[in-house]
Image (cartoon, grey):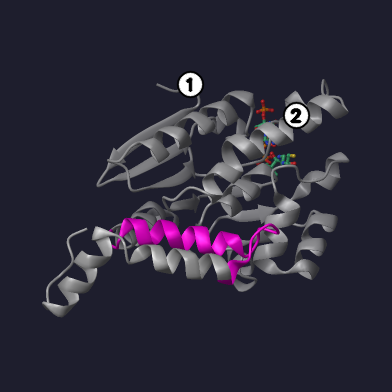
Amino acid sequence: MYQSLLTETSERICTITINRPDKLNALNKTVIKELGQVIDSINNDPAIGGAIITGAGPKSFVAGADISEFLTLDPATGTELAQLGQDNVFTKIEYSSKPFIAAVNGFALGGGCELAMACHIRMASQNAKFGQPEVNLGLIPGYGGTQRLAQLVGKGKALELIMSANMIDATEAHRIGLVNHVVSPETLIEESRKLLLTILSKGPGAVGKVIEAINALYDNNKNGFAEEIRLFGECFGTAEMKEGVTAFLEKRKAQF
Ligand code: COA
């Protein structure tokens, strides 16, 4: 049981709802701690294939880190806040071998935009709004925003969005490649589930290797092409690959 999260699992999908709607689901210390716990439990549970992250209420996905916790921080504790969040939540999602989809149902600002960007895929409802407004507070993004926004939309657009703190709507977020799809608020979860179920019908080991290989592109310590060759080779030792290829040759659907 979590204090600030709701979780529900069906058809191998764990849906995590950040549940502080009166504070627009801002990420306080409890939410960050509990997100870390739920991600660990998803990663360790063979019955769960992937996850959807969304926010409670019709208005907000996550309106950022909880600003009310900021005034007591100094450089050391500020560094610690960013480090712990990145290690226990954001990087852990990105490097999970299970697919995570952000179902962005409203404001995705600051840490909310960063949380969506840490997920492997972003689905946005038509009322979603994105932005990195930290400079309004004399801050910069601390949960990976400077890195992942530049990776997703390019350096120029990332610099503009973060330096101006301008908010963009779902259509613009889609246009610049920040989100994969824009759907109606009513169908957001259903469409996210549909896409995730498609992915979960594939070889799970292969899906995990896709995440690992693509992440290698953004890891300065790795050569992405070499990682792809290594992971491709590994596939030939798996029962999953034998089943997938045999099923194709026998003209039947693979059972993973
Ligand atoms: N941290 C803490 N509390 C937050 C919050 C945040 N990031 N974002 C919203 N809230 C709280 C508000 O303080 C308010 O609480 P209250 O009712 O106790 O006063 C409640 O959530 C509702 O927000 P409100 O500002 O009244 O809603 P709005 O519709 O007028 O404005 C936003 C919505 C998103 C534009 C506005 O809340 C906002 O700018 N939030 C901060 C965004 C931000 O800078 N995030 C980055 C943080 S690093």
Look at the image and tell me in which quarter the N terminus lies.
Answer: top left
Look at the image and tell me in which quarter the C terminus lies.
Answer: bottom left
In the image, residue 152 lies at what x, y percent? Answer: 65, 65
Report the span colored magenta.
201-225
Does the stretch in magenta take in 61?
no
How many numbered marks does the figure carry?
A: 2
Residue at image position (87%, 29%) is 75
Mark 2 is on which residue type?
A: Glu
Badges 1 and 2: C-beta atoms under 8 Å apart? no
Q: Which residue is mark 2?
A: 80
Mark 2: few, some, or many residues within 10 Å (few <14, many ≥20)? few
Q: In the rendered structure, which disc, 1 or 2, sits on the residue that comes first in sequence? A: 1
**Does the Cβ of the disc 2 residue fall within 8 Å of ligand 1?**
no
Residue 3 tag number: 1
Which quarter of the rendered image does ligand 1 occupy? top right
In the image, residue 68 lies at what x, y percent? Answer: 74, 25
Q: What is the C-alpha distance between the residues marked 1 and 2?
A: 23 Å
- Using the rendered view, name the quadrant where residue 164 is placed: bottom right
Q: Is residue 95 above or below residue 253?
A: above
Does the stretch in magenta take in 222?
yes
The secondary element bearing badge 2 is classed as: helix
In the image, residue 97 lies at what x, y percent? Answer: 44, 50
Q: Nearer the viewer, mark 1 or mark 2?
A: 2
Q: Is residue 251 above or below residue 241?
A: below
Mark 1: few, some, or many residues within 10 Å (few <14, many ≥20)? few
Residue at image position (64%, 60%) is 222
The secondary element bearing badge 1 is classed as: loop
Residue at image position (55%, 42%) is 92
Look at the magenta stretch and give its main secondary structure. helix
Residue 78 tag number: none
- Using the rendered view, name the quadrant where residue 90 is placed: top right
State whether residue 79 appears in this view: yes
